[in-house]
Image (tube, rainbow, N blue to C red):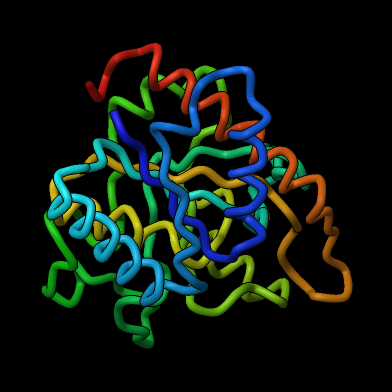
Amino acid sequence: MRILIVTAVEKEAETINAALASSEYDTKACVGVCGGGVGRTNAAAATTEVLIRAENNQQPFQLVLSAGVAGALPQEQNQKTLCPGDVVIASECVYVEEGLITPDGFQDMDGLGFPLGDFPGNRVPTDSKLLDLLNDKYTTGPIATVATCSGTDEAACTVAQRTGALAEAMEGAAVVHAARRLGIPAGEIRAISNTTGNRDQQQWDLSGSLTALGKAVVQIIQLVRLSGLYQ
């Protein structure tokens, strides 16, 4: 079994590689880590390139994980907002901007009648087997994929209300979507690095979130290997 992990920036990739190298488990041999670049275009292009190259070299990947840090979105009063250092697994990855803004509000791609793929609207499903494996071990829920990060309270609330997401990042839907087009199961793992909303009031812990990310990736890879789901 081989797992591809796609990050946005090299610091995320370096953290994951360091965690794998120091792990007591023999995980390094079955994992490839790619720093694909920031944003949806980079993420989709890098994921597709690496998967096709691996297939052509007869070393295909059986699972793809989008992994990195993310911003916690505001939640309803009866729901807990994630804090820096928390880890969340995407139940689905939601494209935020694709659609149409009308006087009556936002319409996603279903409203426009132009499907993005073999899934409803803007919601890219993550692999159900992976989600079942991790559901009782981590916080799970939708993660939004944005082109513009939420640096005001209004923007953060708009993303949360439009998607129902727990957090926002810039690559997950594109990575999972690209893998899905090639028939490879995929999921998204995020460690919360900051809150969203007004920029001068955000709470940040980038170092702590990277540590949490590396630890979670090692644990998840070990759970996946022991499960035998992707053999």
- 26 in relation to 98, above or below: above
Q: Nearer the viewer, residue 19 or 189?
A: 19
Can the viewer see residue 214 in this picture? yes
Image location (x, y in percent) of residue 156: 63, 68
Identity of the residue drawn at 25% across and 63% down: 48
- 94 in relation to 79, above or below: below
Q: Nearer the viewer, residue 149 or 65?
A: 65
The quarter of the rendered structure image containing the C terminus is top left
Identity of the residue drawn at 49% across and 33% down: 28
Identity of the residue drawn at 72% across and 48% down: 210
> Which residue is farthest bottom?
103
The quarter of the rendered structure image containing the N terminus is top left
Q: Nearer the viewer, residue 164 or 225?
A: 225
Identity of the residue drawn at 48% across and 77% down: 147
- 182 in relation to 217, above or below: below
Image location (x, y in percent) of residue 36: 45, 66
Horizontally, residue 83 falls left or right of residue 126, namely: right
Can the viewer see residue 79 in this picture? no
Q: Quadrant of residue 181?
A: bottom left
Labels in figure, total: 0
Image location (x, y in percent) of residue 199: 80, 75
Q: Nearer the viewer, residue 167 or 184?
A: 184
Horizontally, residue 113 falls left or right of residue 5, namely: left
Horizontally, residue 46 falls left or right of residue 27, namely: left
